[in-house]
Amino acid sequence: MKLLAVLLLCGAVYAKHEQYIGWKSYYVGPKSQEHLQSIGPLAQEFELDILSHPILGREGVVLVKPEHQDGFTKALEEQGIAYRIHTADVKNALDLDDIAIETRRRENLARSGREFPYDNYQEIEVIDDYLIDVASRYPDRATLVLGGNSFEGRPIYYLKISTTNFENNSKPVIFIDGGIHAREWISPPTVTWAIHKLLENVTEPDLLDRFDWILLPVVNPDGYKFSFTTTRFWRKTRSTDQSSISETCPGVDGNRNFDFFWNTVGTSNNACADTFAGSQAFSEAETRVVQSLLHEHLHRIALYLTIHSYGSMFLYPWGHDGSLSNNAFALQIVGVAMADEIFALSLPHFPRYTVGNSVLVIGYPTSGASEDYAHFIGVPLSYTVELPGLDSGLNGFHLNPRYIQQVCYETWEGIVAGARGAGDLFVPYAERN
Ligand code: 0X9
Ligand code: ZN
């Protein structure tokens, strides 16, 4: 019986991920700023999928289609950029990941009769059910809001958490979103964990006294769902109305769709590309939900975190040209405070966080990112957070599910430090110059 179950599981698993047959992923290790700057153009030329940005002194991981592998490695050799294989058989690695995830799920069920939400990646239905449930259990502090519907009609929920019903206008607001990039599965659990820590297991009551919270775990539910069911590395939304070829190549990169130097750099006009910026800024229902939340609470937002993976980084504006905003000192200080807190609680083999301007850290500019837009319209502290993962030691093709809990736990401590730092520095909108 057990053997039959394993055979059925393997059969189901091996039928998946066929589209990744022949794909490989490579570590790339740029050794100079010049090397780093060539990653962006190489990504365009060879249609690379950057799974983890390389930085100086730390390799990144890129996914390469079979038809570009020779050209890509030749170009790296010509430029003297070091590389080595990360995964020689991506399809096989994804199959093994699925087996690990499914085995873990079954073991948890067999052991305890239930699934532990942070023992495994969270499907969109699980997250939605949790938001609905937790809001109903804490009606005095939490309000579930339907921010809008995705292109395919899924609800985009967020929670407002407040001890004063969001009515005390002198309280700063902390806004955290996740899951704008579909395949970055470690992002939504860190946001649901923050909800857990503000409602179900409060160990920092000052965070409820001092702040109101907006927590949006999955900005892009269509893409997120699609990455579970069909295409593991799906990044974009699933809209089909953005170009004449969108039926064949759906979706827009949500983090290129904000109205900040929209579609000027680090983006693509090709609907088939992973960094397609859309037909215009805010063409996507999903990014408009974030836009309207930012505007609705702009005068009170002290800190905006948009949670991505991978790379262990806090990145801040300006991401289109690498210049520093006039709040750069505070951005660096609060970023380091978050990173220090995480480092203190991290596991020894997790990479240390890097904090800095996004272009200076990852080496190339991109326009239309939410972190830049938020800062541009007046959010004083705004970061893209790249969670840990994909480095050697965190085995599994993706972050092994056994580390989900650790990432949630340490990220929360970073959020605590970020909120407190942002609260201490907060200047009411009317008093800013
Ligand atoms: O490219 C992105 O959108 C982010 N990296 S990811 O691997 N999660 O896709 C980085 C965004 C950096 N921020 C700005 N360019 N402003
Ligand atoms: Zn991302």
Image (cartoon, grey):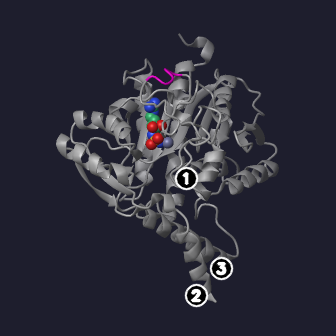
Label 2 Cα crowd, 10 Å radius (few <14 / some 14-19 / many 20+): few
The residues tagged by marks 2 and 1 sit, at their Cα atoms, a distance apart of 30 Å
Callout 1: SS: loop
Q: Which residues are magenta?
A: 260-264
The residues tagged by marks 1 and 3 sit, at their Cα atoms, a distance apart of 24 Å
Magenta span: predominant SS is: loop
Residue 185's tag is 1
Outermost residue, top side: 433
Label 1 Cα crowd, 10 Å radius (few <14 / some 14-19 / many 20+): many
Residue 61 position, x and y percent, is: 36, 50
Q: Comparing marks 2 and 1, which lies closer to the viewer?
A: 2
Residue 230 position, x and y percent, is: 59, 57
Callout 3: SS: helix
Inspect the image, locate mark 3, and give the three-letter code of the amino acid beneath it: Ala
Residue 126 position, x and y percent, is: 70, 57
Residue 149 position, x and y percent, is: 74, 39
**Label 2 sits on residue:** 3
Q: Are marks 2 and 3 in contact (CB under 8 Å)?
A: no
Residue 62's tag is none
Pick the front one: 86 or 70: 70
Pick the front one: 79 or 417: 79
Total labels: the figure holds 3
